[in-house]
Image: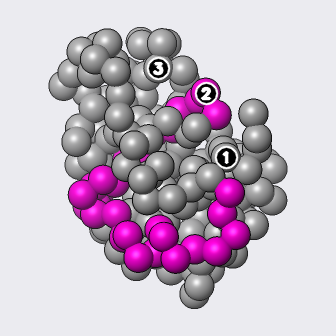
């Protein structure tokens, strides 16, 4: 699969959902692809941290509008992500494959302690991510002008954004009451 698809979907879905993202935290040991995508947005600052609790535990409370995490998130890291996000912040994170039901239910329940909206979405490369938001809904609050006016995209657009949240009935049934949309 094309790596640009993964990078575009991990970055542009949250940045085109958040009302006015200004400060972004990228948690990844290999963030270059994400950084390239964030730079396609005007007036957005980003901070990159290597994966691990040591780095995020030092981040300032309420400093970020969006957190993008390349790695799976556990309860301890979810607590710190919640802490560093603003009151209307959102996070996108990798998570276990949706077929790993127990691991996902555990993660979604943990994340659900901090966020009003929790929705998995298709990254377009046969994997999924989890979007968790304190305020903005990824399909109702998409900023269409931002999504369609970005230059240099190979995959992402507003139609892909909305469509990526469509899930089959078996997923809806399995995660009923856990996915919060």
Q: Describe the element under mark 1 as helix, strand or loop.
A: helix
Q: Would you identify the image quadrant in which residue 11 lies?
A: bottom right
Disc 2 crowd rating (10 Å Cα; few below 14, some 14-19, many 20+) is: few
Question: Which disc, if any, is residue 26?
Answer: none
Check the image and name the residue furthest to the left: 177
Q: Which residue is mark 3?
A: 98
Residue at (64% x, 34% y) in the render: 125
Q: Describe the element under mark 2 as helix, strand or loop.
A: loop
Q: Is residue 149 magenta?
A: yes
Magenta region, residue range: 125-154
Name which of mark 3 and mark 2 comes first in the sequence. 3
Q: Which residue is mark 2?
A: 126
Q: Which residue is mark 1?
A: 5
Q: Where residue 17 sits: x, y (%)?
A: 39, 63
User: Magenta segment, principal secondary structure?
Assistant: loop
**If the image is split into quadrants, where does the N terminus sit?**
top right
């Amino acid at each position: 699969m094309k790596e640009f698809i993964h990078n575009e979907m991990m970055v542009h879905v949250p940045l085109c959902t958040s009302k006015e993202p200004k400060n972004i935290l990228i948690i990844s040991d290999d963030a270059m692809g994400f950084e390239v995508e964030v730079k396609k947005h005007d007036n957005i600052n980003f901070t990159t941290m290597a994966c691990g609790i040591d780095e995020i535990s030092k981040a300032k409370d309420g400093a970020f509008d969006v957190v993008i995490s390349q790695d799976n998130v556990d309860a301890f890291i979810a607590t710190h992500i919640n802490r560093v996000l603003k009151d209307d912040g959102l996070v996108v994170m990798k998570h276990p494959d949706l077929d790993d039901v127990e691991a996902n239910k555990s993660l979604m329940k943990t994340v659900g302690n901090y966020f009003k909206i929790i929705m998995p979405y298709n990254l377009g490369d046969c994997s999924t991510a989890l979007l968790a938001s304190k305020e903005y809904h990824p399909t109702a609050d998409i900023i269409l002008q931002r999504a369609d006016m970005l230059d240099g995209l190979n995959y992402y657009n507003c139609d892909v954004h909305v469509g990526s949240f469509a899930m089959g009935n078996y997923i809806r049934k399995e995660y009923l009451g856990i996915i919060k949309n």
